[in-house]
Amino acid sequence: MRSVGPIARRLLWQNRWLFLLLALWPFIMAAILLAAGTPDPDDVLWMLHQECFAGLALVAVTGSTLLGNEQRSRRIVTVLSRAVSRPVYLFALLVTAWLPLVLYASGFLLAGVMLARSTHQPWNEVFEMAVLQLLLGAWAGAVSILWSVLLPQLIASLVSVLCVALATYAGSFGFPGASRLFASLISGPAAKRAGADVWLDAVLTLIAAAIWFGAASWVFTRRDLNLAAD
Amino acid sequence: MSAALEFRQATKNFGRHRALDGLTLALHPGEILGFLGPNGAGKTTAIHLALGFLRPTSGGGAILGKPFGDTAVRSRVGYLPDVSSFYAEGARSAIEFAGKLNGMRNPRLRERARELVARMNLSSAGKDARKFSRGMQQRLGLAQALVNDPEVLILDEPTSALDPAGVMEVRELLRAAREEGKSIFFSSHQLSEVEQICDRIAFLHRGKLLREGQMEQFLEESGRSEVVVRGPILRDFQPYASEAKDEVVRYVVPVLRQRELIEHAWTAGAELISVTPLRRTLEELFLSWSDGGSGEA
């Protein structure tokens, strides 16, 4: 597991400009809203929901493209020819997909608090949304890693984002776990939910993420790397 | 003594195409084995099987006694791919990265990386390994393969992008590694290199092992002799005469006709200057094996 840090650091550094640009996104949106004077609280809430979805889509797309990029560039050979197991390698990809979300969620939190103060709304809901994003990011990352093992990059990205959308849709019918959290994060205020349910859903989300990741590792360990052979 | 690297009836299919067909081959401790074959013969497939990148369709093998794909044993193996790829970092950092992945820790790792940067002449290579010249990248890939002081080295075309000085350095480096008891699996198209440093060769053709044995054995099996005679060209052996200057004629004849030629020369009153059994070059062998696979050329 000590290999995860060095691998993730290099992968993040490769895409640093893209991630930094995305981290600025919440500030840009906040600036647009504030430029026209005091924004309407409903507009602010709507924008925060959209940003949550964008953050999770960022994880889904990153997670589903990393493996393909590494195979195509053959950098994967540099890593897997050393004493690194395939599950550890996949975990490094998951960490790489999830860590930019920390940066993004931090920006989201700062911009969100700024907007909440300008509309005289409580900012604890923004904090809760940021935490939920990080939690659901682990789920979205694990799902996208699984699809990246099974499908070509572009299709894996689309399917992963579709999974986030489907989970959100299922949550609107009260499905427990990640679905319910997605629904509350993207389409309704999470603060209105009973505290006990949130904890239960959080635990179920992490278990589901572990199962998705376990499935991805199981498949990846049993398949050939996609390398051109002589 | 058990083999450092061993393929046991290793077969790999890609769909309907059989890339490797029942390869059985062993790399013994402390030897350099030249792994040869034309493009598409299955050399890289075999290497990828050994490193666990691919799973065999049937059969298998072992590195240092552990089955292919074993993670821990790879910390005792060094691998140089045919095309090295790097992250956005300098040479020393890339070497340290490879060492870290093999479980090495500072200060030993830092010291080893510094030593390899100097040894492989990488100090002036630049800050981003992705932008190095191909030769520099190959040197860096080799440094990465050597960082953990491996017991087994698997090298896929290690000298293809190097200048003559670089080729010589690598040759010396591999000889030194053999002296230290390391086993080297050397896949290459640089036949002169293979001829100079390998103890044994294995020739793969269309996924099958066609020939395997000591280098000397193959090179001596030419089946032809050079007979140099002073005198007129012998009529019966005119097709074998390759040069004639100042009445000195050089004949290259099959060994079976050597005695006959000498007798003819004596009968004709010619002077026999020398008789030399001809060695084949590895290039000739390669071409004959690639062509028909019989090696009888």
Image: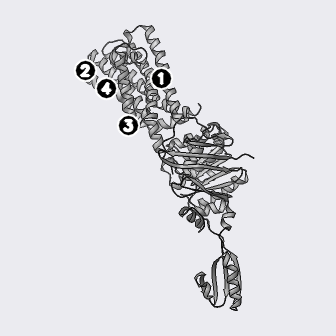
**Dot 3: element:** helix
Q: CA distance from mark 4 to mark 3?
A: 27 Å
Mark 4 and mark 1 residues within 8 Å of each other at the beta carbon:
no
Measured as percent of width and height from the top left, residue B160 is found at 55, 58
Q: CA distance from mark 2 to mark 3?
A: 40 Å
**Dot 1: element:** helix
Mark whose residue sits in front, 4 or 1: 1
Q: CA distance from mark 2 to mark 1?
A: 41 Å
In the picture, the disc for residue A29 is: 4
Which residue appears at 71% of the width and 85% of the height? B263
Q: Earlier in the sequence, mark 4 or mark 1?
A: 4
Which residue appears at 61% of the width and 46% of the height? B9
Q: CA distance from mark 1 to mark 3?
A: 22 Å
Mark 4 and mark 3 residues within 8 Å of each other at the beta carbon:
no
Q: Name the residue carrying label 3.
A: A154
Q: Is residue A152 above or below residue B19?
A: above
Q: Name the residue carrying label 2.
A: A37
* Nearer the observer, B48 or A154: B48
Place residue B62 in its image quadrant. Answer: top right
Q: Is residue A112 above or below residue B69?
A: above
Mark whose residue sits in front, 2 or 3: 3
Q: Hey, what amino acid is under mark 1?
A: Ala
Q: Earlier in the sequence, mark 2 or mark 3?
A: 2
Q: Earlier in the sequence, mark 1 or mark 3?
A: 3
How crowded pointer 4 is (Cα within 10 Å; few <14, some 14-19, many 20+) is rated as some
Mark whose residue sits in front, 4 or 3: 3
In the picture, the disc for residue A209 is: 1
